[in-house]
Image (tube, rainbow, N blue to C red):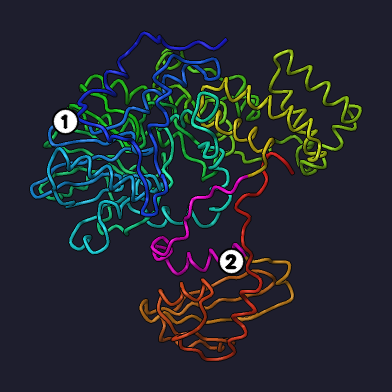
């Protein structure tokens, strides 16, 4: 039976409301075409008591995440919360204001800045800090620094930020975006029966994503920078919640920014949308380092999500418990792994210590103990659990047909699955019904039965992303997939890719089997970079190598294009070779592009 900390404990509500100044009324943000990209008012239903369709712990977290407005955090430090999944923090300097993490969308970022300026004056943005390389912490930057206003404004980020910020959205970007529709419940109704929270924040905005490249790299712990008269001391934390991330202290303001390394929930070691597996061991060590590095130098700690924590003792206790959470998760998974348990077995076995189990900030609203354990297992041992039966299994649809046959056919399988559901064994009912759907995706009764089971599992889930996955699965079983994809292909994002990353993004879309028998070389001479890139198509693989532009290759390419990077973007977008220097056979480019595929942005997930 699930036990929860005391619902009578209102400390989080006090902290989430502390320093309140004003809110955006109405809480709706639209783009230039009038499309709603954010609507926090849609969550007004959270003002009621928890209904039977939502886990009470998740309802509590959603109520906290839905608190919207401008808040004073400390001397000269303000936060706008509830205008995106993430927070925008504003630190007042000598001439203007330094913006930390300008949300996902330019529209929500602009609305947040306007709300701040309404109460603190029309201060110019004199600096921007990206705490880490995830899109909800940089995508809205053009909302605070419109085109033409960024000159002379320092933009600080941890070393490796640009590579990780863009590459994550390119190589496996289509699959991640598709799965993010499930994770964030983008197509679900905002209601007690649908999407209520992600756990990390209430929802994600759906506006314009932008990116301005950093101008100042933070390369070492202890590095100190002064921005608009504001002194900042940095701690690099790579490999924690993001591949490039950093905490930092404002020593003169006695305030500590914890980025997304310590938030008011258990975070993901592996996000359900997909990403590189994070290192829970390093995560714990960097939290411990923050405890000692900044000891005695802060009165408040704030993060890129949720609400601040005030008081040095309270912050230290919070950091210590968060450290222990990730250390325990890592170490106990390894202990049980080395006793021969597999990921799913460990997930069923492991329990948090009572003190963590009874801490609201350690609850699995966004990450979960179950899928985090499996992520640690994956990091060390990969997908294979060592059982030869799992080494060469058939794909899901083939396995499903055989399971249904073993169960006695579709009617028997459906009856047995319904019996398990009636008995309350929803997990196995879902497994059995999933096999039935994958054996025959046209079986409407099976799909509706599975949708009902997913609905029950979702409505009981404490984890916001689990709820969204289950309920979105139910929605798509009933209505089919809906195309709801964030546009990560805008020109500014593309310009932020290095040329090598652009070419890699082409390579991962190449239809290898169709190109097996072809071989060609194309040289790209980038005049604004001073480099020559040779593209080699061979055995269905497109590779590239770089050399100085003035180095004449020993073997000439079949086609050489002399151009700038913006022109290259045009060529890759199919706009032709106008104004591009051409030597050799232009038909080679057409041949190469004929192998490029377009990914399906609404590929099936709950059906084969």
Q: Is residue 604 visible?
A: yes
Where is residue 77? Give x, y as percent.
17, 36
The quadrant of the picture occupied by the N terminus is: top right
Q: Secondary structure at mark 2?
A: helix
Q: Which residue is mark 2?
A: 507
Discs 2/1, front? 1
Q: Is residue 330 visible?
A: no
| Disc 2 packing (10 Å; few <14; some 14–19; many ≥20) | many
The residue under the point 23% across, 60% down is 150
Q: Residue furthest left?
A: 94
Question: Where 286 sits versus 52, above or below?
Answer: below
Pointer 2 or 1: first along the chain: 1
Q: Nearer the viewer, residue 110 or 29?
A: 29
Question: Where 327 sits versus 521, above or below?
Answer: above
Where is residue 526? Give x, y as percent.
42, 79
Q: Residue furthest front?
A: 34
Please tell me whether residue 212 belongs to the stretch shown in magenta.
Answer: no
Q: Nearer the viewer, residue 88 or 564?
A: 88
Q: Which residue is mark 1?
A: 74
Question: Where 411 sits versus 243, above or below?
Answer: above
Residue range of the region highlighted in magenta in the rendering: 482-509
Q: Residue furthest bottom?
A: 583
Q: Residue 159: which numbered mark, if any?
A: none
For the residues labelled 2 and 1, say whether their Cβ atoms are less than 8 Å apart: no
Residue 19: name its quadrant.
Answer: top left
Q: Secondary structure at mark 1?
A: strand
Q: Nearer the viewer, residue 160 or 166?
A: 166
Q: Is residue 334 left or right of residue 13?
A: right
């Amino acid at each position: 039976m699930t036990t929860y900390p005391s619902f009578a404990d209102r400390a989080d509500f006090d902290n989430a409301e502390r320093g309140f100044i004003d809110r955006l009324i109405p809480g709706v943000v639209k783009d230039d075409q009038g499309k709603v990209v954010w609507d926090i008012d849609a969550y007004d239903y959270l003002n009621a008591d928890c209904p039977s369709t939502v886990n009470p712990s998740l309802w509590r977290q959603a109520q906290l995440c839905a608190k919207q407005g401008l808040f004073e955090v400390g001397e000269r430090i303000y936060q706008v919360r509830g205008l995106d999944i993430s927070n925008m923090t504003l630190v007042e300097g000598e001439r203007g204001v330094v913006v930390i993490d300008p949300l996902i969308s330019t529209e929500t970022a602009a609305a947040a800045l306007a709300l701040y300026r309404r109460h603190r004056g029309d201060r110019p943005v004199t600096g921007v800090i990206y705490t880490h390389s995830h899109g909800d912490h940089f995508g809205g930057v053009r909302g605070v620094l419109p085109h033409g206003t960024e000159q002379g404004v320092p933009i600080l980020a941890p070393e490796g930020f640009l590579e990780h910020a863009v590459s994550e959205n390119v190589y496996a970007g289509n699959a991640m975006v598709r799965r993010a529709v499930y994770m964030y419940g983008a197509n679900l109704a905002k209601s007690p029966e649908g999407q209520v929270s992600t756990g990390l924040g209430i929802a994600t905005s759906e506006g314009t994503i932008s990116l301005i490249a950093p101008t100042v790299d933070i390369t070492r712990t202890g590095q100190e920078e002064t921005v608009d008269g504001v002194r900042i001391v940095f701690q690099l934390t790579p490999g924690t919640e993001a591949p490039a991330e950093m905490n930092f202290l404002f020593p003169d303001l006695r305030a500590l920014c914890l980025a997304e390394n310590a938030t008011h929930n258990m975070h993901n070691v592996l996000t359900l949308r997909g990403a590189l597996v994070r290192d829970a061991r390093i995560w714990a060590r960097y939290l411990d380092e923050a405890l000692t590095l900044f000891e005695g130098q802060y009165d408040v700690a704030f993060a890129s999500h949720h609400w601040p924590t005030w008081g040095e003792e309270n912050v230290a206790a919070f950091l210590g418990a968060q450290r222990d959470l990730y250390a325990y998760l890592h170490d106990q998974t390894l202990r049980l792994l080395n006793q021969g348990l597999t990921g799913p077995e460990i997930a069923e076995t492991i329990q948090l210590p009572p003190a963590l189990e009874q801490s609201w900030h350690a609850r699995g609203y966004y990450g979960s103990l179950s899928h985090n354990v499996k992520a640690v297992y994956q990091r060390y041992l990969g997908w294979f659990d060592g059982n030869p039966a799992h080494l060469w299994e058939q794909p899901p649809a083939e396995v499903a047909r055989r399971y249904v046959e073993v169960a006695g056919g579709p009617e028997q399988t459906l009856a047995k699955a319904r019996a398990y559901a009636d008995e309350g064994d929803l997990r196995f009912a879902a497994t059995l019904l999933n096999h039935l759907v994958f054996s025959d995706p046209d079986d409407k009764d099976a799909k509706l039965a599975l949708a009902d089971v997913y609905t029950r599992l979702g409505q009981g889930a404490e984890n916001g992303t689990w709820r969204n996955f289950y309920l979105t699965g139910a929605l798509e079983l009933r209505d089919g997939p809906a195309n709801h994809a964030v546009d990560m292909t805008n020109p500014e994002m593309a310009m932020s890719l290095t040329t090598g990353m652009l070419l890699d993004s082409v390579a991962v879309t190449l239809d290898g089997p169709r190109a097996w028998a072809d071989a060609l070389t194309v040289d790209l001479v980038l005049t604004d970079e001073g480099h020559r890139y040779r593209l080699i198509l061979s055995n269905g693989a497109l590779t590239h190598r770089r050399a100085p532009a003035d180095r004449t290759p020993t073997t000439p390419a079949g086609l050489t294009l002399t151009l700038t990077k913006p022109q290259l973007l045009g060529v890759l977008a199919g706009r032709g070779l106008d104004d591009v220097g051409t030597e050799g056979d232009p038909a080679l480019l057409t041949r190469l592009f004929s192998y490029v595929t377009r990914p399906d942005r609404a590929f099936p997930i709950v059906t084969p």
